[in-house]
Amino acid sequence: MTNALGRVLRGVRGEWTFTADGPGAVVRWTYEFLPARRALVAGVVVPVWRRYQARCLAAVVRVIGG
C-alpha cells in the first residue's frame, strides 16, 4: 500500500455483495485488513473505516433514490 494506511497495513481485501430483496436490495460488505500494526488497526482504522463505508453506502442509496 502506498498511501498513509501503508504504514499500518500490509493490505486490504474488500468484498461487496448485493442481493435482491423485494423492491430493494440487501447490501453486505466485508473488509479484511492485513495489519502490520494490529493494535492500531483494531483501535483506530477499523472504526474509522466502518463510519466511512456507512457514509458511502448512504450516499449511494441517495443517488439511486432509495
Image (cartoon, rainbow, N blue to C red):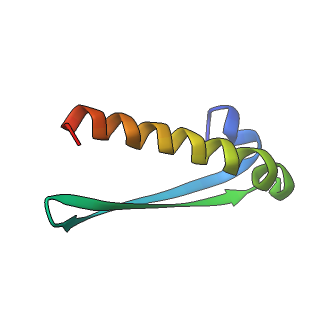
> Closest to the observer: 27 or 2?
27
Which image quarter holds the N terminus? top right
Q: Residue at x 81, y 51 (%)?
A: 43
Q: Which residue is drawn at 21% across and 67% down?
A: 21
Q: Position of residue 13 (x, y in %)?
A: 51, 59
> What is the count of numbered marks?
0
> Closest to the observer: 33 or 54?
54
In the visual, does 55 lie left or right of 63? right
Which image quadrant is residue 38 in? bottom right
In the visual, does 51 lie left or right of 26? right
Image height check: is 27 above or below 57? below
Residue occupying the far left of the picture: 23
Which image quarter holds the C terminus? top left
Q: Position of residue 9 (x, y in %)?
A: 70, 50
Which image quadrant is residue 52 in? top right
Q: Position of residue 39 (x, y in %)?
A: 86, 55
Q: Position of residue 28 (x, y in %)?
A: 40, 62
Q: Residue at x 58, y 42 (%)?
A: 51
Image height check: is 60 above or below 24? above
> Closest to the observer: 50 or 38?
50
Which image quadrant is residue 36 in? bottom right
Q: Which residue is drawn at 20% across and 57% down?
A: 24
